[in-house]
Amino acid sequence: MILLRHGQSEFNLLFTQTRRDPGIADPVLTPLGHRQAEAAAEALAAEPIRRILVSPYRRAIQTALPVARRLGLPLSVTPLVRERYAFTCDIGSPRTELAMAFPGLALDHLEEVWWPPQEEPADQVEARARLFRAEMAALEDWAHTLVVSHWGFIMALTGQSVTNGQMLRVDPRAPAPQEVSWKHP
């Protein structure tokens, strides 16, 4: 499967400059983030992708949409691949707001408030990543899946830190990382 970290968000831009939480809930992509999403769509155009799983955060959906359009595939919104709740940006948008912002996106399976009520400990996000790895490994066509997710979830799943718009190929049948270092670059 291919993991794609969402493009640069308003939060990423400000946090990178100040190293402080700028207090933006569920931020959208910056112009650079939109360019990164378009570049990902271009890079993935020749891949044999049959399924796109995406986190419910707006920045992830905005990143996945150009890929979905390019490949003619629907998005499958999957809270399991959401970001680790640790900053204000990890407060999501309620299902009804997402439905208004992204008409046509299947969201009926989401709770109105689908993100955790408080900071998510590292062991919980690592357990969520192990569950996702096991679910993907059980699928015959896991290799044809694109997952649009976040730094923390990808870190928990692979042990690797990725930048905005970066992609990784992952075999979910391979062993999970023995240890995850939660130091953000």
Image (cartoon, grey):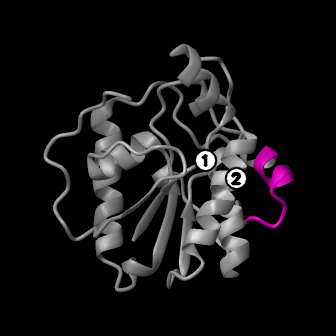
Q: Which callout, 1 or 2, points at the residue further toward the start of the chain?
A: 1
- Name the residue beneath numbered marker 1: 7
Helix, strand or loop status at disc 2: helix
Which residue is the extreme one toward the left? 178
Task: Choose between 41 and 77: the one closer to the eye.
Answer: 41
Task: Choose between 17 and 94: the one closer to the eye.
Answer: 17
Residue 73 appears in view: no
Residue at 53% x, 45% y: name it: 164
Q: Is 82 placed above or below 75 here? A: above
In-image side of 162 versus 67 (left or right) = left
**Position of residue 63 measured from the top left corner of the image (x, y, whole percent):** 65, 55
- Name the residue beneath numbered marker 2: 35
Task: Choose between 93 and 174: the one closer to the eye.
Answer: 174
**Position of residue 68 measured from the top left corner of the image (x, y, whole percent):** 67, 72
What's the magenta region?
97-105
Is 126 magenta? The answer is no
In-image side of 130 versus 56 (left or right) = left
Quarter in which the N terminus is drawn: bottom left
Is 103 magenta? The answer is yes
Q: At label 2, which amino acid type do we have?
A: Arg
Question: Does the residue at mark 1 contact the one at mark 2 (Cβ under 8 Å)?
Answer: yes
Among the 4 quarters of the image, the one containing residue 91: top right
Residue at 64% x, 17% y: name it: 22
**Position of residue 75 measured from the top left corner of the image (x, y, whole percent):** 65, 68
User: What is the number of the mark on residue 61?
Assistant: none
Helix, strand or loop status at disc 1: loop
Q: At label 1, which amino acid type do we have?
A: Gly
Question: Badge 2, how many Cα within 10 Å: few under 14, some, many 20+?
Answer: some
Quarter in which the C terminus is drawn: top left
Q: Is 52 placed above or below 10 here? A: below
